[in-house]
Image (cartoon, rainbow, N blue to C red):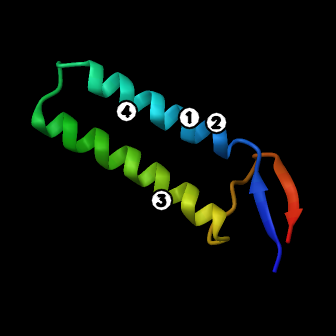
Amino acid sequence: MSSNYNTYICAWIEKIQSNIQKFKDSEDFTDADKIEFITHQYHLLMLINKALIGQVLFVGAKPIGDQL
């Protein structure tokens, strides 16, 4: 079984980590804002996970290539 990994996945994960750190450093969020933020970050991670297991492809994003 081969997989097609995207070169940007590591950068996307780093961006999510950065977003979470900025979120932790800020105190300007309402409870609703917090829920929306965490939900959005979770959905991004789940999208990356789906790409890694071959359930979705990122159209227009340069792939690393086929890996076994």
| Percent x, y of residue 2 | 83, 74
Give whichever of discs 1 and 4 has the lower sequence position.
1
The amino acid sitting under disc 1 is Glu
Say which residue appears at 56% left-offset and 34% top-offset: 14
The amino acid sitting under disc 3 is Met
Q: Which residue is mark 2?
A: 11
- The disc placed on residue 36 is none
| Percent x, y of residue 60 | 76, 47
The amino acid sitting under disc 4 is Ile
Say which residue appears at 36% left-offset and 22% top-offset: 22
Say which residue appears at 81% left-offset and 46% top-offset: 62
Give whichever of discs 1 and 3 has the lower sequence position.
1
Q: What is the C-alpha distance between the residues marked 1 and 3?
A: 15 Å
Q: Which residue is mark 4?
A: 20
Q: What is the C-alpha distance between the residues marked 1 and 2?
A: 5 Å
- The disc placed on residue 46 is 3
- The disc placed on residue 14 is 1
